[in-house]
Image (cartoon, helix red, strand yellow):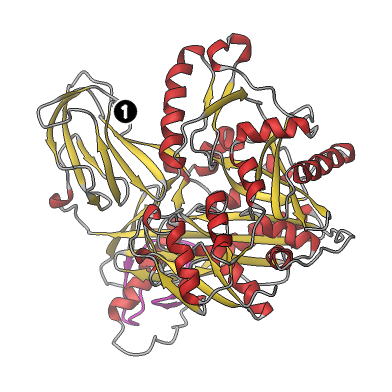
Amino acid sequence: MTIATLLVANRGEIACRIFRTCRDLGITTVAVYSDADADALHVREADLAVRLPGSAPADTYLRGDLVVAAALAAGADAVHPGYGFLSENAAFAAAVQDAGLTWVGPPVKAIELMASKTRAKELMAGAGVPLLAPVDPATAGPDDLPLLLKAASGGGGRGMRIVRELAALPGELLAAAAESASAFGDGEVFAEPYVERGRHVEVQVMADAYDTVWALGTRDCSLQRRHQKVIEEAPAPGLEDALRTRLHDAAVAAARAVGYRGAGTVEFLVSAEGRPYFLEMNTRLQVEHPVTEAVFGVDLVALQLRVAEGEPLDPELPVASGHAVEARLYAEDPARDWQPQTGALLTLEVPDGPGLRLDTGYVGGDTIGVHYDPMLAKVIAHAPTRTEAVRLLAGALERARIHGPVTNRALLVRSLRHPDFVAARLDTGFYDRHLADLTAPGGGDPATAALAATLAEAVRATASPGPTPTPTRLGAWRNVPSQPQLKRYRSEPDGTEHEIAYRTPRTGTPEPYDAPGVRVLAATPDRVTLELDGVTRHFHLRRDRDRLYVDTAGASYTFTALPRFTDPATQTDPGSLLAPMPGTVVRLAEGLAAGAAVEAGQPLIWLEAMKMEHRILAPASGTLTALHAAPGDQVEVGALLAVVQEDLDATPVPASVPEETA
């Protein structure tokens, strides 16, 4: 059969990416959307769209019955699940087919067989795929440590715990089981040896109904935070030919063992000694599929549609060429435990050019909400060699203009240029070892960027309404009788404060005060050009309320304009617990009420936003003097949740800790 109208049972970047292929093939596209996504990019790009009432995923994108009804209402004849949500839900795949629709995915049986990691491992053992030996937690001893606890269902890091001490095993088992049950409706957890400094290497497979199975090379996805991938590349560097062959053969065997069709990924852990172990098979398209597309010159979504229509794959594999690297751009603050960020995305501009690709679910002007994953976009670079691809990607990210919530952009650039990454010394502990250095303040010249912001703001203040003024050409600044004025800024997110002195001479154009070696060559509210010790530098500026965004060669800065004097009204009482992000209060500690005694580090309030749960901890032992939160409350960032009057002898602890990420 031929697919004429396709509904994508997903949102954001992956929905937009699938729509792109559909447009190329002449297929009509249908989006589904929650109330929170009513004006989302994937809705705007679709030919048709169907509302799923509500905002929470459980009420919308996870409601298979509503999605099937939407497909029928829109006249779709096929459904593509994307990734996440219902993409690996066998019951949903069956419901799609029972409704007479074409399912763009693997057979229901294959999804069922691979849905449980424990059952999948048993099946793979029979197919000769290398495995880690399971460990029975009830009989685990010191020699079995460290252990990795994993949820039998689902993925994305939920239900996963590393155990290094036997005394911690019972509690971690309970926590992992509870987390798994909450996320996937299945509390089954299993244990296996934790491989220190292992690499996450996977093989992309594509199979048709005529016994053709492609193994489309390897990908390295070792750079991860909270067991979620951050940077991926293809082919996986530094693997011996024999190991590559073994991985390809094992992936094909895994696909054949379950009668697989369509796109799938077989994931392996490769030890430091080069021994591979099967982790799981993802029965869907992966987030990192673009690097394989770039290297093999294929469109995996187009191939999925071809297989779903009953067409065969070519018997010969496509030929690989070059190297590709992908970075996931997240609205999050890596320096603050990867805390998700929300708000208006004012600007998202990534350089375009040969070898570069941007897959995104957002554009400038969109709003990043609290309900879904904080990934903004994926930036992909393809070049003849790994060195060239890495350099191209780092340069594109560095030149990108991203204004609004804090992102991981700087971390990505530093990661790509880190000596270990450049030398392909990769393993899943990369961020555990290097995060502090990668997020430390330093580099660039924020003081000069703050000076540029000051000059632009001074021009803005004196400019009359109307078109942007023509840049004023100036010579070196010189002493004049006018008194200096001060501007204060706080760098975000590190909090460093800058105080800039300037004055406005009779020319009417502001200039720095007491700044040897600085010449102002041009200044407007959105662009300042300075000569710094003989080198000309350009600064591009954008203002949004009290925020100023400054982009220059090699660095970007965000400043908050501060009043000259501190406003006492902005101060909070000692011991105040503030919401670290907008979100929903999901629960309180048992018996928590004003007047209760609390211990330092005791979890008091659980706040959930963007698939991450934060525990708000008592900063020290003392008494809870006020409680302003209740389960179900929607709170904004900075909202006062509670106040703890601390014991002066108590040891302070961080006020919030992110507990889980999906």
- Residue 474 position (above or below residue 224): below
Q: Position of residue 445 (x, y in %)?
A: 49, 55
Q: Quadrant of the N terminus?
A: bottom right
Residue 275 position within the rendered picture, expressed as x and y whole percent measured from the top left? 78, 29
**Residue indicated by mark 1:** 653
Give the residue drawn at x 28%, y 77%: 461
Residue 198 or residue 388, whichever sits in front: 198
Given residues 360 and 459, the one toward you in this image is: 360
At label 1, the amino acid type is Val
Q: Position of residue 274 (x, y in %)?
A: 79, 30
Side (left or right) of 242 relative to 428: right
Q: Residue at x 29, y 87 (%)?
A: 465
Question: Is residue 533 visible in the rendered structure shown here?
Answer: no
Magenta region: 502-528
Relative image position of residue 479 (x, y in whole percent): 36, 70
Q: Is residue 479 within the magenta segment?
A: no
